[in-house]
Amino acid sequence: MKKVITYGTFDMLHQGHLNILKRAKALGDYLIVGITSDDFDSRRGKINVQQSMMERVEGVKETGLADQIIIEEYEGQKIDDINRFGVDIFAIGSDWQGKFDYLSEFCKVVYLERTKGISSTQIRSKNNHLKLGLVGKAKRLWKIANEAISINGLDIVGTSGAGYDRRLKKLDDYSFEELIEKVDAVFIESDIKNRYEQIKYSLERGKHVLCYLPMAIGRSQQHELLEIAKKNDCVLMSGIKTAYSTAYYRLLLMIKSGEIGDVASIETTCTSLDEVSKIKNYQKNDIWSAMDAWGATALMPIFQILGTDYVDSMIVSKKIDGYFDLFTKMDFVYKNAVATAKIGKGVKSEGEMIVSGTKGYAYVPSPWWKTDYFEIRYEDQNRNKRFFYELEGEGFKYELVNFLRAINHGRTLSYTGNDVLEEISNVYEKFYDGKDVRTI
Ligand code: C2G
């Protein structure tokens, strides 16, 4: 019996895939199809895949052409598979011409002609062509605009509030209402006090929203926004990019699956330092305070891991003008754990995250909010494990791709729960209200 093997992502299965599977099958008697796992794809830079691995497996199964389906999970697996299954022929599309010659040491390598005029990329851009507007100050928007360029099916049509900025010069700046009329969706990273109204306005007109946190001040306003989104069939998603990096997402899964035992403590630190003279004129210089710039990011993992049912909390803030916090420390006491978030704008510290558990701890080095690497450490150092998942750019790409996926398929790979969004808004309300805040 002649065994043939072929590999692919097979996203949104199309005629080109069918042709290659048929041709591969015709080369022998038994066809093995290796389908990439979601992780493997994101590691090799294919991050815009629309279907989950299970859906892609189903797609290939339905063709009835595969005698066996396996999952491709790591670099170098092809050699293992060929030896393991006693494969005679490795077949792949001609777009890979020459790339797999190294396998000819193990079996025959055949490049099959690729079907012209069709690709998953093309189908994706036809299906998901989305017009996105950016709302906020230019300084904060140009990075996201930059990383959005390489995403299929996403067009940035303009900005609002950005004014003139060299780096965004190709984009026109509109009034907020004008921009909303032109788009299908918006990314909002405006001043916190404007967000609630902007989100409400957008959702009521059927536009999807990706917004930095908090989206609103206070639990009830945040809840109201989520309800409006539901009623209007719109996606309303957290715009904190950290949540969408593969490493961060894996870290959360690992902690939740008990890798470090029961979590007893979480510490997150996020700081950035502006010049003192600039900070003194923060309004004129458009500088966000520690809480406005970092609060939500530092709170996010705490509420995602420990939940939102803490029994006690304390906020201590070092402020200027009674408003602008240079440094804030937020402590939370849970029934079985404690958590601390330290954030600074006029104070600098080590930007790490440590999650301590009864079996070991997770350590994410600075800057943890751009998570690409973390360690799980144990009492016995020999058991320590290191994890690295490459992060392209600053990670805006991953959040935009998840946003697109949520709009097109009603789901995302990483999802910040509504309870987390509401609790973050609640902490901001307490903070601005000042009643429970000790100022030093
Ligand atoms: N294909 C084709 N014609 C098209 C599109 C795709 O013949 N119009 C072929 C590809 O050449 C490949 C297979 O269909 O052999 C699967 O394509 P993709 O899903 O795009 O997967 P790819 O990224 O090529 O994965 O390590 C190698 C990878 O596993 C191959």
Image: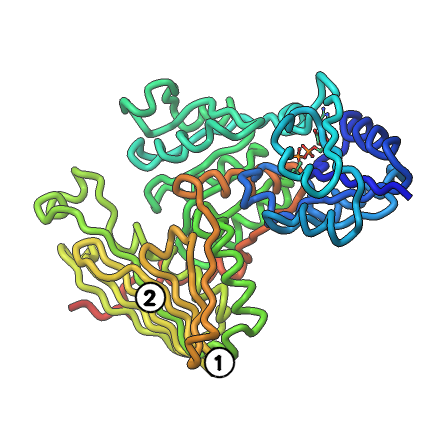
As rendered, which of 105 and 230 lies closer to the eye?
A: 105
Report the side of 133 relative to 107 (left or right): left
The quarter of the picture where residue 310 lies is bottom left
The residue indicated by pointer 2 is 341
- The answer to whether 269 is drawn above or below residue 6 in the figure is below
Q: Secondary structure at mark 1?
A: loop
The residue indicated by pointer 1 is 359
Mark 1 vs ligand 1: CB under 8 Å?
no
Q: Are marks 1 and 2 in contact (CB under 8 Å)?
A: no
- The answer to whether 69 is drawn above or below residue 180 in the figure is below
Which residue is at the far left? 277
Q: Which mark is residue 183?
A: none
Q: Quadrant of the N terminus?
A: top right
Q: Quadrant of the C terminus?
A: bottom left
Instruction: Name the quadrant where ligand 1 sits.
Output: top right
Amino acid type, residue under disc 2 in the picture = Ala
Q: Which residue is located at x 43 percent, y 59 percent?
A: 300
Q: Residue 117 in the image: x percent, y percent?
A: 71, 17
Which residue is at the far front? 105
Mark 2 vs ligand 1: CB under 8 Å?
no
Q: Earlier in the sequence, mark 1 or mark 2?
A: 2
Q: Residue 98 in the image: x percent, y percent?
A: 62, 28
Does any portion of residue 335 appear in the rendered image?
A: no
Q: Secondary structure at mark 2?
A: strand
Q: Which residue is located at x 63 percent, y 47 percent?
A: 38
Question: Crowding near pointer 1: few (<14 within 10 Å), some, many (20+)?
Answer: some
Q: Nearer the viewer, mark 1 or mark 2?
A: 1
Q: Residue 131 in the image: x percent, y percent?
A: 53, 26
